[in-house]
Image (cartoon, rainbow, N blue to C red):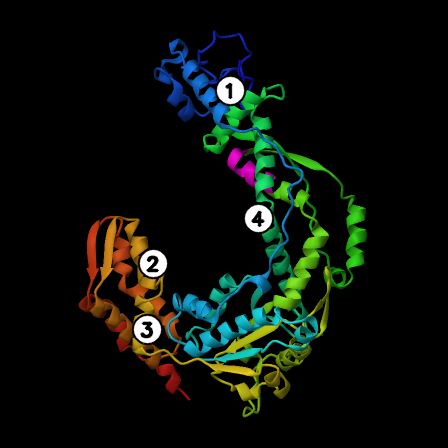
Amino acid sequence: MFPLVRCSGKILPQGRFRPGILAPRFQFHSRIGCLPSSLLSRWSTRSLSNSLNSPVGIRRFSGAAAAARESTTPIVLDATEEIEDDTTASGVQLLPREVVDHLDRYIIGQEAAKKAVAIAFRNRWRRHRLDKEMREEIMPKNMLMVGPTGCGKTEIARRLAKLADAPFLKIEATKFTEIGFHGRDVDSIIRDLIEISITQTKARRRRKVSGIVNKIVEEKIVERLVSHSASKRDKASFLKLLRDGEMEDMRIDIDLDIKYPDSGPEIPIGHVIEKNPHIMLEIRRLWGQGDKKERRNVDVKEARKLLSEMESDKLLNNDDIVKEAIRSAEQDGIVFLDEIDKICTSSQSLHSSADASAEGVQRDLLPLIEGCTVVTKYGNIETDHIMFIASGAFHSVKPSDMMAELQGRLPIRVELKGLTVNDLERILKEPEFNLLKQEIAMMSTEGVELSFDDDAIKEIAIVAADVNFSSENIGARRLYHIVEKVIETISFNAPDKKGKIVVSKDYVHKQCGSISQKTDLGKFII
């Protein structure tokens, strides 16, 4: 006999109906439980709509269970299985050519910038191959990327963040204020970096124990699906169904450990807690943190996710994770400071419109980039070997308007070129997931087969370049506006108009003619 199945619905007492008959009102039976109707239909000899008089093919179900028992091994955890040590970015070989090739898939041109960041990545790996004394003496070659808006500076940072197997933080310099002013100080850069490092380290270690965790989670879910008195054979049959994805929508009750926030309550002295970790320990003690649990009713798919996270945390040592994360952040961390030109003041202007604390932010960045100790709730973080990459358009100011000390701490300077018509055309064609491919994929969901002629693509690039020249030059970001204008009518009528649509040069000119003829007269006003 199959055991009772736990579920949120009602289960009829065993013996109330004759074996093999599905209860018409509750659609449950003590021998079948709350299996999905789609699964029951696979084993039924007749339609389930025949209600009480329709027997369910229990023999077929029993045959499937027997096959599952033969093919499924018991859930056994190997206590001797060890968790391998993690490898960080220092152990990953990123060849310069591989980095450039990866960036070429998404970014057009800017070869100098790509080579510079590729060399910087490789130097990180080279440094870890040296002996300790030499390794401590080699400092990262921090970089300053200078180029007009929309030429690819931010995109390079975004792609590097996905490529780097290291703590990587991209942040705008305009978010910070000088210490003493209201706002975030630059030390929060390192605090954000260590949080990213902890998240990455924990994810790596969870992958290491995923095999063990999956076995534990499957065992817990099966225990919630069947009664405690179920035999190993019955558990094996349900385990087979679970692994086949047949029970993903079934709801079960699970017990989860109550999580407490790591950063404490949102109180005005949060900054004091950040710099004094022992205060946080006292607050956690006052909260009475312990082994408390909460019961939740979720489907199997969600239960697998929640239980995996809980069981992974039990197998991992939080202190070891923090130590590894600190080491990874200190030795392999990369900070990308965007819009650094916005905290500079032109030396030729008598009255600066910049924020009063902008120059103070530059001064605060000096020790951070040069190398200092930042206090966080996880411990002291040394910034000596963290690499900083700064970037800015420098339209209204020049790189020389930065403080001389800050310029000296960014010794590698890379000039990014403005985009030409040919570059804009390549951006529409060559990247792996270019803008036109995205629009074609979007229209395909409506049954519209959209395509662009080569002449049409070139015309879009020409219009974008003309608008950039006649108004504010925003580089490749102008393509978003032009492409959206071109397909505006097509996108609006897509639900009603199926079939193939080819965008031609004449169509582009018709849709964007008014845009290209407009001139921003505001720049001529004195």
Where's residue 268, x and y in %?
73, 60
Q: Main secondary structure of the magenta part?
A: helix
Q: Looking at the picture, does residue 26 appear above or below residue 211?
A: above
In this rendering, the count of numbered labels is 4
Q: CA distance from mark 3 to mark 2?
A: 16 Å
Looking at the rendered structure, the kind of residue marked 2 is Gln
Tag shown at residue 207: 4
Q: Looking at the picture, does residue 177 appear above or below residue 221?
A: below
Pointer 3 and pointer 2: residues touching (CB < 8 Å)? no
Which picture quadrant has residue 149?
Answer: bottom left
Mark closest to the chain's N terminus, 2 or 1? 1
Nearest to the observer: residue 73 or residue 239: 73
Nearest to the observer: residue 436 or residue 233: 233
> What residue sits right under mark 3 in the picture?
424
Residue 71 belongs to the span the image colors magenta: no
Q: Secondary structure at mark 4?
A: helix
Which of discs 3 and 4 lies nearer the camera? The answer is 4
